[in-house]
């Protein structure tokens, strides 16, 4: 065991929230080390000329190596769990920047009603409206508590969008359902794909309120917190699952990590895999044990430990970090680690074919779109509906490349509607691709995911990683509420597509069972949720473990349930708030739960 | 604001063996054994000194005076590695590349198979003309033929029909029994590698096709067999199951037809020309999102090299900002 010089704080992972904490705390004088299992990488030179779908989308070069570590899954507690042997449902990253380097860049604030979900629904519809077996609970903070940090993030990393609610004043063209923001976006929205404008026009005609997708991608050159001018988006079409060659897409590596490194008080040790958090006899954490790229074991002692890795890694490390004082793992004195695992409903219920009309969809990215929030959250009346929650609806993503999209061309034997080809191989299919590869337009939804008693993380009893440590096991399937929500939203999507006047429409009216093998989103949340006290949560609103106050968890592991929006914007705001609380409150009374 | 030269990070004091305050938990307290990893790994930084992705870039140990002057990023030593930049001629005669995995007979059968998934003629190229079989052959020469990190530990899954697992299920340690209806939800779970699936699948295909092989059949006979493969009804396919074979063949055909030509398929960008995809382009103007583009398809091999701080010519719009200074050292 190689023991290092003590530092003030050690993080597991060098991704988004490690970057936030590193920049905020090292500039305030703290020393910090990040233990990062992946490689060192930055836009230059690592993402230069990376416009290669085989390498990035097919071979997952920026993602965790499943040969070393994976996760198992079963649909329910009475089914067998099997490992993800090749990538499917989600794509956790590795290396500096983590998933936040190859993310889509879609950047949101959650709605005010997302923060007090249980209270909101109970007051409006009665407690009986919430689905059976749920573990829904309010967040311990409100949208108003987080608003200043959301705004700070917007300006420091550079976020593009159109405000819809500026200090209570509704602005047409923005998201009129959003919570009030204190400042507009620092940058105007990105451009939109050609069919997104058709979608926008149809939605407006139907009385909905379309707005441009907000993005952590610069729409024009911008000087961010680092003082460096970064390029605006080039709309190259190689965005999700790629690092951005010109740093238009924000990540920890574009701005925050370089600032932290420049203080001389921050160090990232790459190719180093954390195996557990060490604790003392009094139950407080003492540091992180990790294995380096040559297989040697190290110990990094620190006053504070930050679990800043991906949700799955954070939860797994808590469970693996057993000791006499924490026999079931850190944070787990009350058995709540792993609970409230939620995911995301990400589907394309409807696809329209605008035969032989080229839509130029290989350009742009996931955020060059228009969105409506008219059916998200409780923005519509649920009194006569048999489900709770909602979904955003949007169309049509750019960055289409043939390798990953030719399989999505609708064919004749789907949904019984006459389509361009009758099978997805052969001459008719080839001709259909020639005619319509750039002409089919999905409408996509991103819906809420609610927590249930039979949806959770724990350690797998059978499968291990390359070090012999148990893999994390996921128990998850869609529930009744998801099926009903999907059915309703699919009908709304159908109506919009008919208004868009596609030549042919394919509909998938039902959700069906959860398919672990098919990519949906990397929005895995919960497992170390925040709450008002140790009886209902693993952490307080700062991510501080109730049972081990010198350990903080960041990221989406903290979410009690997952709203209908990408998680990154909110976990950044939470990390900003946590960094401030550490500086202003925790350091004045260390090793104690922040009041 | 200019960021200062990044200082070297402190090296771990490997000679310092004192225990940390509070004690280190022994492995037994964890409840799990920690197995020594068997493979050492080279740190990327050490590797970078001897391999260069792009000739003009800074490497470890350089100093950069400003964040905008790329010429200030001088290489650490006098190495001048020549790398392909799109102007050199193609490395081999595409009509007679060497096979790395398939035997000649396997390649013939595979080529005939993929040619029915994407048929073609010299005037309207398909999988054969695009060299898809060579993409697949090259892919299959990598470990397992996977191309990406794949979790390969037992126990592997076996499917059972109906609703009840076999009586032996509770005792099986090397097999996890899953209902046939549910198994597809778990994704790839076979103990067979992609190399196995191709090799064994082609053998079953050739057996089914009879003397003369699959390549000797007429197009409609071939299509009839492929239809059976897709439906899972092709006789003689136990290892791998017919559907698994069809699924992998189709996936690899798509990759080989539409992936960048540097991987051996999509010759002359035939796949991209078919669907109208311009390939590896650096930038599009906002107006092009609406009107489309006239630029011809381009492979990675032809993509203009990006030098930090240097705007390019042509349609590409590059930022005037470099980031060579963000590279640091690590222990």
Image: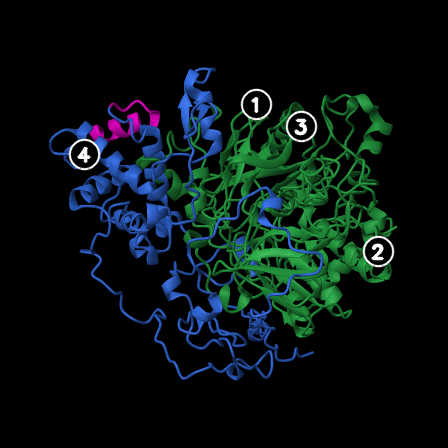
Q: Establish if A147 lies above or below A459.
A: below
Inspect this view and state whether residue B83 appears. yes
Mark linked to residue A182: 2
Q: Chain of mark 3?
A: A
Instruction: Tell me which numbered mark, 2 or 1, is placed earlier along the sequence.
Output: 1
How dense is the environment of label 1, judged by Cα within 10 Å: few (below 14), some, or many (20 and up)? Answer: few
Mark linked to residue A485: 3
The answer for how far apart the CA atoms under marks 2 and 3 are is: 33 Å
Q: Is residue B229 magenta?
A: yes
Residue A299 vs residue B307: left or right? right
Q: Which residue is mark 1?
A: A78
How dense is the environment of label 2, judged by Cα within 10 Å: few (below 14), some, or many (20 and up)? Answer: some
Residue A358 vs residue B19: left or right? left
Nearer mark to the viewer, of 1 and 4:
1
Residue B324 vs residue B224: left or right? right
Residue nearest the observer in this picture, B46 or B73? B46
Question: For the magenta stretch, what is the residue range?
Answer: B220-235
**Magenta stretch prevailing secondary structure:** helix
Instruction: Tell me which numbered mark, 2 or 3, is placed earlier along the sequence.
Output: 2
Residue A584 vs residue A404: left or right? right
Residue placed at 59% from the left, 26% from the top?
A76
Q: Is residue A217 magenta?
A: no
Q: Which residue is mark 4?
A: B214
Q: Are marks 2 and 1 on the same chain?
A: yes
Q: Colour of chain B?
A: blue
**Residue B243: image location, x then y, percent:** 35, 29
**Residue A229: image location, x then y, percent:** 65, 72
Residue placed at 49% from the left, 77% from the top?
B58
The answer for how far apart the CA atoms under marks 2 and 1 are is: 49 Å
Which secondary structure lies at badge 4? helix
Dots 4, 3 in contact, CB < 8 A: no
């Amino acid at each position: 065991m190689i023991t290092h010089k003590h530092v003030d704080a050690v993080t597991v992972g060098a991704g988004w929230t490690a970057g936030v904490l590193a920049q905020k705390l090292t500039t305030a004088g703290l020393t910090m080390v990040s233990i990062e299992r992946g490689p060192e990488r930055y836009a230059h030179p690592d993402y230069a000329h990376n416009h290669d779908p085989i390498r990035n989308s097919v071979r997952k070069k920026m993602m965790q190596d499943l040969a070393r570590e994976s996760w198992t899954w079963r649909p329910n507690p009475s089914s067998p769990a099997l490992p993800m042997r090749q990538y499917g449902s989600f794509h956790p990253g590795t290396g500096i920047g983590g998933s936040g380097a190859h993310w889509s860049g879609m950047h949101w604030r959650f709605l005010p009603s997302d923060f007090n979900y249980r209270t909101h629904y109970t007051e409006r519809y009665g407690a009986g409206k919430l689905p059976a077996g749920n573990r829904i609970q309010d967040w311990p903070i409100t949208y108003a508590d987080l608003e200043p940090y959301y705004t700070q993030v917007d300006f420091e990393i550079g976020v593009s969008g159109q405000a819809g609610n500026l200090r209570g004043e509704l602005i047409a063209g923005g998201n009129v359902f959003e919570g009030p923001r204190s400042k507009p976006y620092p940058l105007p929205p990105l451009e939109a794909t050609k069919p997104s404008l058709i979608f926008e026009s149809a939605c407006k005609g139907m009385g909905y309120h379309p707005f441009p997708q907000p993005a952590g991608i610069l729409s024009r050159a911008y000087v961010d917190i680092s003082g460096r001018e970064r390029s605006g988006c080039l709309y190259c079409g190689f965005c999700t699952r790629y690092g951005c060659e010109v740093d238009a897409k924000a990540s920890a590596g574009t701005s925050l990590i370089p600032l932290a490194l420049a203080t001389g008080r921050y160090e990232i040790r790459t190719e180093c895999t954390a195996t557990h958090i060490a604790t003392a006899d009094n139950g407080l954490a003492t540091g992180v044990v990790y294995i380096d790229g040559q297989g040697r074991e190290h110990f990094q002692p620190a006053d504070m430990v930050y679990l800043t890795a991906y949700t799955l890694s954070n939860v797994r490390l808590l469970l693996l970090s057993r000791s006499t004082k924490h026999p079931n793992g850190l944070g787990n004195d009350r058995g709540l680690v792993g609970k409230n695992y939620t995911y995301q409903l990400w589907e394309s219920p409807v696809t329209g074919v605008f035969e032989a009309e080229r839509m130029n969809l290989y350009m742009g990215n996931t955020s060059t779109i228009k969105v409506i929030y008219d059916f998200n959250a409780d923005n519509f009346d649920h009194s006569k509906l048999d489900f709770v929650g909602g979904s955003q609806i949007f169309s049509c993503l750019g960055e289409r490349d043939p390798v990953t999209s030719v399989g999505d061309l609708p064919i004749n034997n789907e949904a019984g509607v006459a389509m361009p080809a009758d099978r997805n191989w052969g001459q008719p299919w080839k001709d259909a691709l020639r005619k319509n590869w750039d002409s089919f337009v999905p409408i996509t939804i991103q819906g809420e995911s609610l927590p249930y008693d039979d949806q959770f993380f724990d350690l797998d009893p059978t499968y291990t990683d390359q070090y012999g440590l148990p893999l994390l096991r996921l128990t998850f399937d869609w529930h009744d509420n998801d099926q009903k929500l999907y059915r309703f939203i699919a009908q709304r999507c159908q109506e919009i597509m008919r208004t868009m006047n596609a030549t042919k429409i394919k509909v998938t009216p039902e959700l069906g069972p959860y398919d672990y093998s098919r990519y949906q989103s990397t929005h895995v949340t919960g497992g170390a949720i925040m709450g008002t006290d140790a009886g209902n949560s693993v952490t307080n609103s700062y991510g501080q473990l109730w049972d081990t106050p010198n350990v903080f968890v960041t990221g989406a592991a903290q979410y009690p349930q997952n709203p209908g929006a990408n998680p990154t914007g909110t976990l950044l705001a939470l990390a900003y708030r946590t960094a401030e609380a550490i500086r202003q409150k925790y350091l004045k009374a260390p090793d104690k739960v922040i009041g | 604001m200019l960021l200062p030269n990044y200082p070297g990070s402190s090296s771990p004091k490997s000679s310092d063996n004192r225990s940390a305050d509070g004690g280190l938990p022994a492995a037994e307290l964890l409840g799990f054994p920690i197995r020594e990893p068997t493979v050492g790994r080279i740190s990327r930084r050490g590797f970078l000194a001897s391999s260069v992705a792009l000739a003009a870039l800074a490497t470890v140990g350089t100093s950069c005076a400003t964040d905008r002057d790329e010429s200030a990023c001088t290489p650490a030593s006098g190495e001048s590695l020549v790398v392909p930049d799109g102007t050199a001629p193609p490395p081999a005669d595409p009509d007679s590349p060497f096979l790395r995995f398939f035997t000649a007979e396997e390649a013939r059968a595979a080529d005939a198979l993929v040619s029915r998934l994407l048929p073609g003629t010299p005037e309207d190229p398909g999988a054969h003309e695009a060299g898809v079989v060579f993409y697949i052959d090259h892919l299959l020469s990598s470990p397992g033929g996977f191309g990406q990190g794949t979790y390969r530990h037992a126990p592997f899954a076996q499917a059972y029909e109906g609703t009840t697992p076999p009586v032996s299920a509770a005792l099986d340690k090397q097999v996890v029994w899953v209902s046939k209806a549910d198994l597809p939800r778990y994704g790839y779970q076979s103990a067979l590698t992609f190399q196995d699936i191709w090799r064994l699948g082609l053998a079953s295909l050739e057996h089914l096709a009879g003397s003369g092989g699959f390549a000797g059949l007429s197009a409609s006979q071939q299509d009839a067999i492929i239809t059976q493969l897709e439906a899972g009804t092709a006789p003689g396919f136990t290892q791998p199951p017919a559907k698994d074979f069809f699924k992998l063949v189709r996936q690899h055909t798509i990759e080989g037809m539409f992936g960048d030509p540097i991987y051996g398929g999509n010759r002359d960008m035939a796949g991209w020309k078919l669907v109208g995809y311009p390939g590896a382009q650096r930038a599009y103007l906002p107006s092009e999102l609406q009107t489309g583009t006239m630029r011809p398809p381009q492979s990675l091999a032809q993509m203009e090299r990006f030098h930090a701080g240097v705007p390019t010519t042509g349609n590409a719009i590059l930022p005037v900002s470099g980031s060579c200074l963000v590279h640091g050292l690590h222990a």
